[in-house]
Image: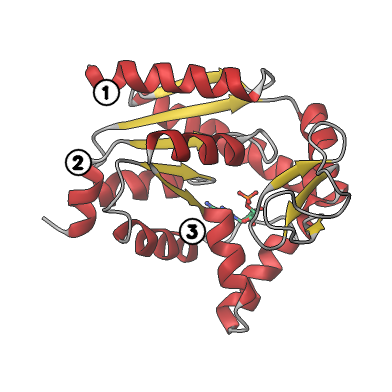
């Protein structure tokens, strides 16, 4: 069996779906800390790649800056490479993947996923827009802040590593609207796919972060003893 199939067949996989700003990243970080699961954010993987001054890096940056999805083939290759490096963890959390039906089908086909649970964080567009335009991120460690609901102690500076806080270029209102449009075009197909596999769990994404983490953990515990 290939290393990848081995990893995917033995480790629990959590897939976090939801619109941009629905809290997938925050939940993934929290769950990764408490469950010792490996957190794979495709947005982070792509942003790291885009910082490299390569042709591929520049292409990826253009997609991200315009709020467009990176082509399926590119993201799948990047993700599979990272998955191969995940075999020392107790499970894997996919944050931001899949974003198209093709990605969902390919993940299913390539990895033969057995212990997968898919969580869909449901948040309405108005709440998303309000959340994202006030979102700030540490350029050094990636910690997220919100100017109103979760401000840093010192304006513009990360509480954890003292890095500079910035607004992501694609967090501007016009680009968020584009990202939401793509999300509403692609996500129903993905949800239907996982619904048909019987592994989809809907979570109300407008509860407190702690409550959402708890609901997710309860579902995981139930699923893993089935
Ligand atoms: P995120 O940090 O998850 O909001 O992702 C930021 C951007 O990265 C997205 O708007 C897309 O341009 C790109 N991206 C992230 N994940 C994917 C994916 N699975 N497929 C295609 N593009 C992606």
- Quadrant location, the N terminus: bottom left
Check disc 1: other Cα within 10 Å, few if <14, some if 14-19, many if 20+.
few
Q: Residue at x 53, y 35 (%)?
A: 30
Position above or below: 219 against 135: above
* 2 or 3: mark nearer the eye: 2
Question: Mark 3 or mark 2, which is nearer the start of the sequence?
Answer: 2
Which residue has dot 3 on it? Answer: 72
CB at disc 3 and ligand 1 closer than 8 Å: yes
> What residue occupies the far left of the structure in this picture?
1
Q: In the displayed structure, does residue 35 sit left or right of residue 59?
A: left
* Residue 203 position in % (x across, y down): 55, 19
Q: Secondary structure at mark 1?
A: helix
At 85% from the left and 42% from the top, the residue drawn is 134
As drawn, the label of residue 215 is: none
Disc 2 target residue: 10
| Extreme residue in the bottom direction | 54
Residue at which label 1 appears: 224
Instruction: Measure the alpha-carbon separation of dots 2 and 1.
Output: 12 Å
Q: Are marks 2 and 3 in contact (CB under 8 Å)?
A: no
| Mark 1 Cβ inside 8 Å of ligand 1 | no
- Toward the viewer: 98 or 139? 139
Q: Position of residue 46 (x, y in %)?
A: 57, 63
């Amino acid at each position: 069996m290939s290393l990848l199939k081995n990893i995917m067949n033995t480790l629990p996989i959590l897939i976090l779906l939801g619109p941009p700003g629905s809290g997938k990243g925050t939940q993934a970080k929290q769950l990764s800390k408490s469950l010792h699961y490996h957190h794979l954010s495709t947005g982070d993987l792509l942003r790291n790649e885009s910082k490299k001054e390569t042709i591929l890096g520049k292409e990826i940056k253009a997609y991200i800056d315009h709020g467009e999805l990176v082509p399926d083939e590119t993201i799948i290759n990047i993700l599979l490479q990272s998955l191969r490096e995940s075999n020392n963890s107790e499970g894997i959390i996919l944050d931001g993947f899949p974003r198209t039906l093709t990605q969902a089908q390919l993940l299913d086909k390539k990895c033969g996923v057995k212990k997968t649970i898919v969580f869909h964080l449901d948040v309405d567009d108005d709440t998303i827009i309000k959340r994202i335009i006030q979102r700030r991120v540490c350029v050094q460690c990636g910690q997220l802040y919100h100017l109103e609901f979760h401000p840093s102690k010192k304006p513009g500076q990360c509480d954890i590593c003292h890095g500079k806080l910035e607004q992501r270029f694609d967090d501007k209102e016009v680009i968020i609207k584009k990202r939401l449009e793509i999300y509403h075009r692609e996500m129903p197909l993905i949800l239907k796919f996982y619904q048909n596999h019987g592994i989809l769990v809907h979570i109300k994404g407008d509860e407190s972060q702690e409550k959402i983490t708890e609901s997710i953990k309860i579902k995981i515990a139930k699923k893993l003893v089935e």
